[in-house]
Image (cartoon, grey):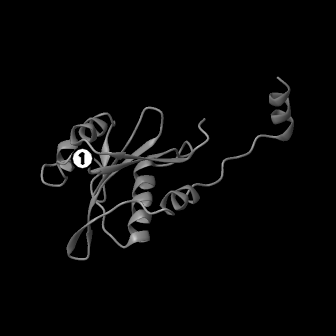
Amino acid sequence: MSKWRVKVVPLRDPRKVMRVLQSLRRLADHDYDDLLPSEFWTEGTYQLHPRWVNAYLFVLDPLPGLDWVAHARRAARLLEARQGVELDWAAGVRKSGQVWLVAKVMAWEGDRHVRWHPASGDIEALVRMYPPRPRKREEERSRERMR
């Protein structure tokens, strides 16, 4: 089990974003539970310049048993509420159980387009969204240290 709960990766290359989306089992967004990568990542919704970030990949490591669609929607709503924008995002689940949420940089603030980037406290807010993991008992930890 990994030590981190949330990881953010900026994605610049539009082809890499499409490969990431195609690697996910099933995609969901605000409204749909079954979305094709080509329906989400369409030309004209991202920048072609190779130095600009086009999307952010949020790798979420939830506890087993959580509904991944509801979890992704909750995470996206939290990101939207923190900055007052409406994100264009899609999420899917990996074989490992991790939820990968891809949020485009082009967002809506009211009736105009804005460039969105995760703020400094967004990752901490996403981590606080998780229930704490159960700690190992003290004697199990001391046995591990003695090995």
The residue tagged with tag 1: helix, strand or loop? loop
Residue at numbered disc 1:
35
Q: Residue at x 29, y 57 (%)?
A: 105
The image shows residue 129 at horizontal and vertical percentages of 55, 59
Q: In the displayed structure, would residue 30 be above or below residue 81?
A: above
Given the image, on which type of amino acid does mark 1 rest? Answer: Leu
State left or right for residue 66 relative to residue 12.
right
State left or right for residue 121 relative to residue 31.
right
Q: In the displayed structure, would residue 8 be above or below residue 2?
A: below
Q: In the displayed structure, would residue 101 be above or below residue 76?
A: above
Figure quadrant of residue 138? top right
Q: Residue furthest left?
A: 44
The image shows residue 118 at horizontal and vertical percentages of 41, 60
Quadrant in which the N terminus is drawn? top right
Figure quadrant of residue 25? top left
Q: Residue furthest top?
A: 147
The image shows residue 72 at horizontal and vertical percentages of 41, 53
Q: Nearer the viewer, residue 50 or 63?
A: 50
The image shows residue 36 at horizontal and vertical percentages of 21, 43
State left or right for residue 93 relative to residue 13.
right
Quadrant in which the C terminus is drawn? top right
Q: Residue at x 21, y 49 (%)?
A: 40
Q: Residue furthest bottom?
A: 110
Q: Nearer the viewer, residue 134 or 84?
A: 84
Q: Answer few, some or many: residues within 10 Å of disc 1's Cα (few below 14, many 20 plus, some between 14 and 19).
A: some
Q: In the displayed structure, would residue 55 be above or below residue 93?
A: below
